[in-house]
Structure formats: C-alpha cells, structure tokens
Image: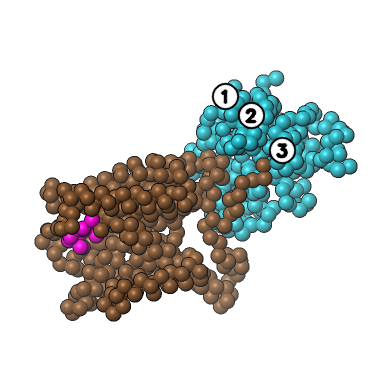
C-alpha cells in the first residue's frame, strides 16, 4: 500500500514536470520561468552530486562550485573552440572533472572533518583565481560564449534535456545507495574507525565517492553552460559551492528527493524575488536556513517524512516504535576515544 | 606448541604516551583466552594493535605463521581476525540486517553465502531476526552487544577479539552473552576476550593474562588465576 502511494507520488511529480513547460510556453512571462526551472534542475544535479559525498559519505566538500565551473568551462572549450560534437563533449567533460576530482581527493581525503572542508574551500579559491588570471583559458572578463546547435535553441527543448538527465542522475544515485556501496558509505559516515575495524577500506570508499560526485557535478556544469550560453570566471566561484550546500541542507541530506526539492524550489524563489527584494532576499533566506536547520535538521523532505510517520502513528492505528520518530542525526554515535 | 596468534614484545604508543610496553602472549588454536585489566591498562589498545588499527612501534605479531604487524586492517580481517570493539560500536542509522551484512564486507559478494551467514547469526541470537529491519540505534544495550558480536562473526573469523562485551549490561544479559561466547568457541572459533568482570571471564576461559599499565604482570591457567590472592583482591573483590 505504502509502496504504491510512493510510486503514485513520483508519477504525479513526473507528470507535472513534463506538463509544466507546455503550460508555461503559452505566455511570454511563462517562457522565462522555463529557463529558471531548467537552471533549478541544473543545481539539483549539482546538489545530488554533493549528496553522494556529504550526505552519504559524510565529507563536506566545499569545492563543488569549482568542479561545476571546471565542467562548464571544459565543455565550452571542447564544444566551442575545439569543435567536438555536443553529445561527445558531455561524457568527456564528466571524465575530465572526475579525473581532477580524483587528483584533488588523493591528498584532501586524508584529512578529516572540518579540515577536509577547509582544504576543498582553499582549492575552490585557487581555481577561481586561476580562471580570473588565465584569460587564454577562461576568456577573462569577456568570458566564453557558447553557440548552441539549432535544435537546442528552444527553451523547452533544453528543459526536457535537463529533466531527462536529472532523472537519470537520481536513478543512478538510487542504485548506488541500494547496492552494497550505499551502506558501506553510510558506515564510513557514521563511524570511520569502526568501518575500518570491520574491514572497509575507508579511504578507497571516500575516494570513489568523491570521484563519482565530481563526475556528476561535471554534468551539472555542462548544462549550466548550455542554459547560460555564456561563462565568466565567476562560474567557478566558491559562492556556488555554498549555494549547492544550502540547497542540499534545506532540501534534506541523505535523501533522494531533498536535493531536488531544495535546489529547484530555492532557486525558483530566489529568482522570483530578485526584482522586488534585490540582495535583501539573501537575508531572508539566511533566516530560513537557520529555521530549517534548527527545526528540520534533515531538511524539508526529512521534515515531511517525520510528519508523515507522526500522522500515521496518530491516526493510522499502525504501531510505530516511538524511537523512530526522534531525530537521529547521522553522527549521533559518540566518537570519543575509548577509555584506554 | 604452535600458537594461532603469537605476540612478541609488542610496544606501542599514542602520541608521546607509551601505552603498551613489551607485551608477549600466545593464543592456541581453539582456545578461549581472557585478558584481565582495569580501565586504562591497555586492553583496547592491544586489541586495536592486533587488528591493525594502531601500528605497533616495536615487536612482532604472528598469525598462522605470518607476520601481520604491518598489514592493513582490511587485510587482517580477510586473514581471519575479527574485532568486536568495546562499547557496542554499531552503525546506528543502518538496519540490523545491514549492520550484519557490513560485517561480511571483506568476504565474497556471493549473496547466497552471505545469506547463509545471516542465518547462522540469527541462529546464534534469535532476537536479532525479529529486529532485522529495525535501525541498530533503536536496540537495547544487550541487543546492541549481541549485534556487535554477530557482526564480528559475519566475517567468519578464525580468531575473534571481544573487547569488554559485558560493559554496562545487566547481570542476566551478561550471563547470556558469556554462554554465547562459549557456544561460539565450541563451534571452533578461537577467542581472545578482554574483561574487567574477572570471575565470569575466568570461569569460561582456559587461560588468562593480567594486564597492568601496558605490561603483562601475571599469566597462567584460568583456575590458577582465579585462586590467586592478588587477582582476587584486585579484580574479584573477595
């Protein structure tokens, strides 16, 4: 019963996502919304990729903005300057970002907790400085333009392309989490020392997760470049890393729907209030972030799940162990050094 | 006597503190050996050293004729040494079943074989079967300890290192767990058991060591240690 309800919900959301551009395409104002939603889905792919390393493996990467920018630039250069076919440039870009991610992961994943976050943030700052100064690579202040093939010139076509890849990324992530790799990543997150004692090669697991995560964020970079059709060095900014992080936190870490709800929802809201509130909107979203982290530590999707379980216990008559309602964070286990 | 596990003059330090000062001990195949010691004596450090989580600064550890002191924890688990760490360490957000499957991580990915081991684990602790879908963090203390032991057994170890399995548990549960330890031992698994609960531990084991400040101060057959005046005073309190 519950399973059918879940599948029904997914199909409903999918139908809405497919129907939406048809409705929006009718008016001129609506057409802008298609673009906003497409970019929202691009950020959703980025948030899903961060989810793999932060949500499931517990390593807070603050370099995903840089990797997304690297992906975007790599794609733009391959497609625009080298002249490679659009759909051939996509996998090459993902492989390049994954390779750079692998090389960055080799030293950085040996550090733990906040040190990893600092390391990756530093990497992001370095990448930004490099892209600002290497004008032969980034096009400098003028940036790098992208001329799309004619069949991608329509907004709704790009919308469906990104929607298709978003669903693909979700299915891939679901498969990873359901397989044996998922629990072993969660094992690393919840207690690295114990994971090692059980015989899990924690460094290897983290490196694989980080590389896969960079592969996916490279894909987000490709579609970012496709939708913007113009890149400046700011595309590699660490601000993007924080946006991805905030989308993920507000949506809900370690869930599949959370990053998508967080990214599409927040990006849409931020764009909606751009004219009326200007930069003040960030103030309001700061407050929302604080509110969500205090009252819904598992994000909006986690909060809804919790309410659902509570409602089921209250009215459903089905016995739910009260423990399952209490919030259990990813790291509730005491990590202290044992007594001797 | 050819021992399954042979520690020769092991020393190890954490930072600048030396925690193990030249420990030598032997565990024969099929034995149940206990290691007594107060808090801070170095029991857990010694267990971590054997399982490769801490690298010793000197001495050798030989398991089945092979030196293992430089091997990674993952290699050591594969060779057949499984650690059940102190304080019922589990993956609280994973279900009981997944915790158990994690225990078999180093073994073949053959699903049928893992299912067989799962059945063995449920056979050892039937309560875990009832709880298999529940998150490990929601179990009671005794059940968590059972799960920790069962998970260690999922690796099909030749040698099981049990670090204070009775810590913080009710006497009745401790009794049940001690019975299971004997049961595991009679199934052919060699066990090294660290305990503060000396009377219980000595009652089930064949030999014992007493660890103090990182050195072995006494060793011998369990019955002899149980009768020893100093051991009685320090660890049994009678």
Of A16 and A2, nearer the camera is: A16
Give the number of the disc on residue A167: none
Whole-angstrom CA distance, mark 1 to mark 3, is 25 Å
Marks 1 and 3 close (CB-CB < 8 Å): no
Query: What chain does badge 2 belong to?
Result: B
The location of residue A195, given as percent across then percent down, is 53, 45
Q: Is residue A321 above or below residue B119?
A: below
Q: Residue at x 45, y 67 (%)?
A: A299
Which portion, as a residue range, is magenta? A223-233
Q: Which one is in front, A31 or A132?
A: A132
In the drawing, does residue A264 fall left or right of residue B114?
left
Instruction: Tell me if mark 2 has few (under 14), some (14-19) or many (20+) residues whose alpha carbon lies within 10 angstroms of its own.
Output: many
**Along the polypeptide, which appears first: circle 1 or circle 3?**
3
Apparent colour of chain B? cyan
- Magenta: main secondary structure equals helix
The furthest residue to the top: B1
**What residue is drawn where x is 32% and y is 69%?**
A267
Q: In the displayed structure, does residue A321 sit left or right of residue A71? A: right
Q: Which residue is mark 2?
A: B11
Gap in angstroms between the C-alphas marked 3 and 2: 13 Å
* Foreground: disc 1 or disc 3: 3
Q: Quadrant of the C terminus of chain A?
A: top right
> Which one of the lettered chains is coloured brown?
A
Q: Is residue B108 magenta?
A: no
Q: Is residue A171 visible?
A: no
Q: Position of residue A159 (x, y in %)?
A: 23, 66
Tell me whether marks 1 and 3 sit on the same chain. Answer: yes
In space, the residues marked 2 and 1 are separated at their CA atoms by 15 Å
Res B67 label:
1
Q: Provide the residue designation for mark 3.
A: B41
């Amino acid at each position: 019963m519950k399973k059918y309800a879940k599948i029904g919900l997914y199909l409903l959301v999918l139908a809405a996502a497919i129907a939406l551009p048809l409705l929006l395409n009718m008016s001129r104002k609506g057409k802008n919304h298609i673009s906003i939603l497409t970019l929202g889905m691009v950020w959703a792919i980025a948030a899903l990729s961060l989810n793999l390393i932060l949500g499931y493996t517990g390593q807070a990467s603050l370099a995903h903005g840089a990797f997304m920018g690297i992906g975007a630039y790599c794609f733009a250069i391959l497609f625009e300057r080298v002249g490679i076919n659009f759909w051939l440039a996509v996998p090459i870009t993902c492989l390049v970002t994954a390779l750079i991610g692998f090389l960055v992961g080799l030293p950085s994943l040996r550090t733990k907790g906040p040190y990893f976050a600092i390391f990756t943030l530093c990497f992001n700052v370095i990448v930004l400085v490099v892209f600002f100064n290497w004008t032969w690579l980034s096009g400098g202040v003028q940036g790098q333009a992208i001329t799309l093939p004619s069949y991608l010139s329509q907004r709704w076509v790009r919308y469906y392309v990104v929607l298709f890849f978003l669903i693909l990324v979700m299915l891939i992530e679901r498969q990873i989490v359901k397989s044996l790799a998922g629990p072993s990543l969660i094992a690393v997150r919840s207690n690295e020392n114990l994971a090692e004692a059980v015989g899990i090669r924690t460094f290897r697991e983290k490196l694989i997760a980080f590389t896969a995560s960079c592969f996916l964020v490279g894909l987000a970079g490709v579609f970012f470049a496709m939708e913007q059709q113009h890149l400046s060095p700011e595309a590699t900014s660490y601000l993007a890393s924080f946006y991805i992080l905030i989308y993920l936190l507000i949506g809900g870490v370690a869930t599949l729907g959370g990053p998508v709800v967080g990214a599409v929802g927040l990006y849409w809201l931020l764009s909606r209030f751009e004219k009326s509130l200007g930069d003040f909107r960030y103030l309001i979203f700061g407050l929302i972030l604080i509110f969500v982290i205090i009252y819904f530590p598992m994000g909006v999707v986690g909060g809804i799940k919790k309410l659902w379980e509570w409602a089921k216990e209250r009215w459903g008559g089905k016995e739910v162990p009260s423990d399952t309602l209490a919030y259990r964070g990813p790291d509730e286990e005491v990590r202290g050094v044992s007594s001797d | 006597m050819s021992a399954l596990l042979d520690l020769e003059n092991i020393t190890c330090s954490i930072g600048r503190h030396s925690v193990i000062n030249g420990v030598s001990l032997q565990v024969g195949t099929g034995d149940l050996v206990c290691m007594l010691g107060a808090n801070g004596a170095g029991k857990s450090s010694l267990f971590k050293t054997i399982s490769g989580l801490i690298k010793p600064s000197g001495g050798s550890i030989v398991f089945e004729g092979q030196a293992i002191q430089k091997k990674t924890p993952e290699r050591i688990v594969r060779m057949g040494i499984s650690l059940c760490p102190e304080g019922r360490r589990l993956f609280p957000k994973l279900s009981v079943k997944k915790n158990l499957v994690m225990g078999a991580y180093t073994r073949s990915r053959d699903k049928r074989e893992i299912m067989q081991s799962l059945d063995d684990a449920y056979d050892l602790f039937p309560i875990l079967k009832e709880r298999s879908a529940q998150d490990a963090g929601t179990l009671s203390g005794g059940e968590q300890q059972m799960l920790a032991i069962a998970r260690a057994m999922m690796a099909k170890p030749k040698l099981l290192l049990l670090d204070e399995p009775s810590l913080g548990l009710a006497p009745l549960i401790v009794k049940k767990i001690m019975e299971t330890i004997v049961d595991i031992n009679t199934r052919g698994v060699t066990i090294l058991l660290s305990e503060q609960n000396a009377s219980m531990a000595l009652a089930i084991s064949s030999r014992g060591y007493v660890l103090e400040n990182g050195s072995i101060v006494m060793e011998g057959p369990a019955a002899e240690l149980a009768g020893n005046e100093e051991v009685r005073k320090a660890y049994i309190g009678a």
